[in-house]
Structure formats: C-alpha cells, structure tokens
Image: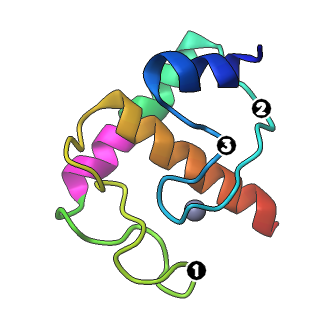
Amino acid sequence: MTWAQRLKRVFSVDIEVCGSCGGSLKVIACIEDQDIIDRILAHLREKEQDVPAGLLLVPPTRVPPATLSLFAGSDPKSVRTLLKNAWHELLRTLVQE
Ligand SMILES: [Zn+2]
C-alpha cells in the first residue's frame, strides 16, 4: 500500500483527485524538509492575511471563477486546506510549464 493510499484510508484525503476541479493528480515530489515546509506554510499564511477572503489568487483565465481559492473550504486556516491548495497550485504550475 502506498502512502497516498494510506492517507486516503486513514484521513480520507485523496491526493490523486483535485479537491477544486475533480481532475486527476499525480505525485511528482514529496517535501520532507521541515524548514521548507515551514517556509511554505508561513508564505501561505502571509498571503491569507494580505488578501481579502473570497478573492481568487489565480488569474481567472486559468480556472472558472469561484472554483479555486486559497481560502476555499470551511476551515481556511487548517494546514490540510493550505497544503491541498498549495499542492494544487504547484501541480498546475508544473503541468503548464
Ligand atoms: Zn484542479
């Protein structure tokens, strides 16, 4: 059983399906360095404080309006939401380049 399958089974987090658009996702990297994780989370928290809730953080030409927000979900401050959205953005960036 892969760790992705374990995440799905134990925490009901399916990292192979995009939570925003339902598209399929593929694991291309795993960040384990705590310093890098802390920097990513700090950056996302800074962005969360700078931008009014509900404002889209990606150009509207990239996704339909109101389908992708860094603050989507019922608990915008949860690490799970932050990581999920960060992961989605990273994958979108890598796929488009
Ligand atoms: Zn998506």
Q: Position of residue 89 (x, y in %)?
A: 57, 55
Disc 1 marks which residue?
62
Q: Position of residue 91 (x, y in %)?
A: 69, 52
Choose the circle earlier in sequence order: 1 or 3.
3
Asked if residue 36 lies left or right of residue 85, the reply is right
- Amino acid type of the residue tagged 3 in the rendering: Glu
Asked if residue 53 lies left or right of residue 82, the reply is left
Q: Quadrant of ligand 1?
A: bottom right
Disc 2 marks which residue?
29
- Cα distance, mark 2 to mark 3? 13 Å
* Number of the label disc, if any, that sits on residue 16: 3
Quadrant in the rendering for residue 27: top right
Q: Residue at x 39, y 31 (%)?
A: 80
- Cα distance, mark 1 to mark 3? 20 Å
Q: Is residue 70 visible?
A: yes
Quarter placement of the N terminus: top right
Considering the numbered disc 1 on the image, is that residue within a helix, a strand or a loop?
loop
Number of labelled discs? 3
Q: Main secondary structure of the magenta part?
A: helix
Considering the numbered disc 3 on the image, is that residue within a helix, a strand or a loop?
loop
Choose the circle earlier in sequence order: 2 or 3.
3
Choose the circle earlier in sequence order: 2 or 1.
2
The residue furthest bottom is 61
Quarter placement of the C terminus: bottom right
Q: Is residue 63 above or below residue 45?
A: below
**Which residues fall within the magenta stretch?**
44-50
Q: Residues within 10 Å of mark 1 (few under 14, many from 20)?
A: few
